[in-house]
Image (cartoon, rainbow, N blue to C red):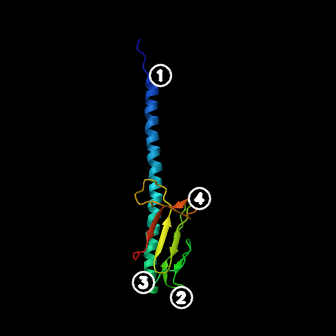
């Protein structure tokens, strides 16, 4: 008499294959989320950089300081808004801005350690739990 069904070995093999496939899928998902957050950070800095260039065209220089999370406008003419609201990194990291009025540098912390645009020597000051700034955008005249 033939029995219908699967042997214990066959069931274990199928479960092992499903486990391997799910582990690969979860790993790719986590990697994709990290890359998406880094892309958002790069886009945030590019948007701020365009606003800074517009400001410099009107004032022949860059502002001394920017407050991230607040509106970026002309201090002499508050109706002139360069950025409705400067971005905040929602992952607990900070953006950093340095300027000497003739040039600027914007910094962020990227999570993807394989990103080709990472700085060779990161600098301190991007918040988080001791996170260093490992990505930057500089003004076009630098």
Q: Find out whether the residues at labels 2 and 1 contact each other: C-beta distance under 8 Å.
A: no
Under circle 2, the secondary element is loop
Sequence-first tag of 3 and 1: 1
Query: Which numbered disc flags the more N-terminal residue, 4 or 2?
Result: 2
Please state if 120 lies on the left or on the right of 126 as rendered.
left
Marks 4 and 2 in Cβ contact (< 8 Å): no
Mark 1, secondary structure of its residue: helix
Outermost residue, bottom direction?
76
Residue bearing mark 3? 57
**Alpha carbon of mark 3 to alpha carbon of mark 1: how far?**
74 Å
Residue at x 45% of width, y 82% of height: 56
Camera-side mark, 4 or 2: 4
8 vs 50: above or below: above
Q: Most extreme residue toward the front, as rendered? A: 121
Tell which circle, 4 or 1, labels the residue nearer the N-terminal end.
1
First along the sequence among labels 2 and 3: 3
Front position among marks 3 and 4: 4
Whether residue 53 is situated above or below residue 130 in the rendered picture: below
* Cβ–Cβ under 8 Å for marks 3 and 4: no
Pointer 1 residue: 8
């Amino acid at each position: 008499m033939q029995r219908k069904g699967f042997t214990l070995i066959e069931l274990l093999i199928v479960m092992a294959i499903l486990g391997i496939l799910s582990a690969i899928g979860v790993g790719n998902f986590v990697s994709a989320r990290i890359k998406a957050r880094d892309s958002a950070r790069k886009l945030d800095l590019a948007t701020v950089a365009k606003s800074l260039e517009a400001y410099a065209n009107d004032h022949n220089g860059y502002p001394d300081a920017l407050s991230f999370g607040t509106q970026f406008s002309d201090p002499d003419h508050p109706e002139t808004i360069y950025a409705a609201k400067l971005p905040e990194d929602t992952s607990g990291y900070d953006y950093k801005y340095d300027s000497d009025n003739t040039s600027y540098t914007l910094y962020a912390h990227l999570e993807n350690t394989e990103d080709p645009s990472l700085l060779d020597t990161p600098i301190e000051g991007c918040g988080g739990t001791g996170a260093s700034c490992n990505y930057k955008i500089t003004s076009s005249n630098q």
